[in-house]
Amino acid sequence: MSMKWALLSVWDKSGIIELATVLREHKVGIMSSGGTGKVLSEQGIPFTEVSTYTGFPEMMDGRVKTLHPRVHGGLLGRRGIDDTVMEAQGIQPIDLLVVNLYPFEEMSGKNLPLDQLIEYIDVGGPAMIRAAAKNYRDVAVVVDPADYPLVESAVLSGSFTGDERIMLAKKAFSRTAAYDAAISNYLHTEGKEFPDVFTVQFRNGRPLRYGENPHQSACIYGSTGIAAAEPFQGKQMSYNNYLDLNAASGLLREFDEACAVIVKHNNPCGVAVAGSIAEAYRKARDTDPVSAYGSVVALNRPVDEPLAKEFCATFVEVLCAPAFTPGAIELFKTKENMRVIHLPEPVVQDEIRTIAGGILVQRTPSYQEHWETVSDRDPSSDEMSALNFAWKVVKHTRSNAIIFAGQGKTIGIGAGQMSRVDAAKIAIDKALSPLANSAVASDAFLPFPDTLEVAVKAGATALVQPGGSIRDNEVIDAANQHNIAMIFTGIRYFRH
């Protein structure tokens, strides 16, 4: 079925002149109005004004222009079923609808008064999009300038395929759903931090082989950040790979120095910084070589061929870095199962977690830690450096968490324990390097002196914790008795 009429009504004018030119060259009549019509006129492209077609002028400052039975009848009329009534009412079948919407999402971030922002809520556009998408067998609907080349190909071939039509309809309904969600969320949030009704949409859904375990099914959604990341080599990413890579990249971004983060089961099992990324990786791996086997590794510097050889000599599930040299990429081809992936740009967004019957939504605003030495003894410069390092790592370790660190590297990691003392004991038991003169970080306050005493006995000389316990004075007294330097930060970092 060849195209005879197209209706063009777009806010984003990108590519619309080129598209209109192709349509006219192939004898497709154009209807338009408002700003789109003005742009077409300026370029000398002939078109039929919507108001001329409907017999009604644009009114109410452009609020009403396409909301008319002759427009919606042309979009909704079923070919071969509604032809008689369309002809009787002078309704012209519209074969192609090209629409994009007023930029409500963009304008809602500009702190406009509601009576001004409300004018950026498109009514006619979504109505036409939904009408055309409902009648996708007869009307092709395009809501994204990125699809204009598809339109041009269809014009050249004479029509859209059935698969192209349903694809465009799906995209159209997704767009109106996202648009309405943005409006709903904004209005429900007015005067509040979070909306009473929260609507979200994630695109780019891709099925995964399975979920956390083989008997569970899973899918991933997202068009940016870790959610959009795909390996350029190796097997498909798994559900657990994505969780671990997300944990690793979050911790990695704490550091500006060359840094390596090794994660297993959503917890770091080795973290280090160094003068080179190769040295950082070796230091991180040596924290716990057994756990590093089959892990996810994230680096913040490019990988060259010598370092690639080290990865090829062991078993790594996922390797993520900003870049890889051609020689490194060639070497990785010998490890067919190792997933190699480019480190994506960070994304700032609310955290969403499901629970039975709903979701939890968490937002992290800008905040300031207030480090304060509460012990009689100030930490030395080396101790302060190790405390800073340990504190960055403990922020990204499952609670209860205790981290022992030296200069630029983890020494012992105790994660995910019900007892903070047990977390400390596990960190000590797993340490492969001496803990003498180490620094310790606790993700939450120490309710009793016992954890500090366990750390001191193992060789720690400095400790950082949030503080805030009703027994803080007892813990401070214990620190002074053992001549340990202790810092309070005022910020807790539970991770559940």
Image (cartoon, rainbow, N blue to C red):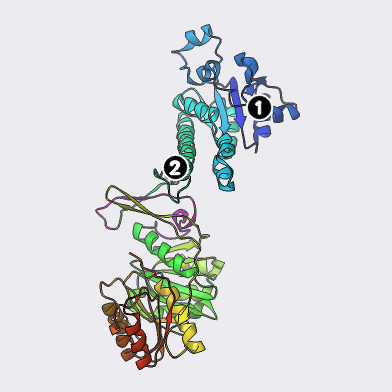
Q: Residue at 26% across / 78% down in the picture?
A: 422
- Whether residue 228 is in magenta: the answer is yes
Q: Secondary structure at mark 2?
A: helix
Give x and y (percent) for residue 262: 41, 72
- Nearer the observer: mark 2 or 1; the answer is 2
**Span highlighted in magenta in the image:** 213-237
Q: Quadrant of the C terminus?
A: bottom left
Depth check, front residue: 87 or 164: 87
Give x and y (percent) for residue 160: 52, 28
Depth check, front residue: 223 or 414: 414
Q: Which residue is mark 2?
A: 188
Q: Disc 2 or 1, which lies upstream in sequence?
A: 1
Give x and y (percent) for residue 390: 43, 78
Above or below — where is 407 with respect to 228? below
Q: Which residue is mark 1?
A: 34
Q: Amino acid at mark 1?
A: Gly
Above or below — where is 50 with respect to 104? above
The majority secondary structure of the magenta stretch comes to loop
Q: Is residue 391 left or right of residue 156?
A: left
Depth check, front residue: 79 or 379: 379
Above or below — where is 208 with respect to 115? below
Q: Is residue 221 visible?
A: yes
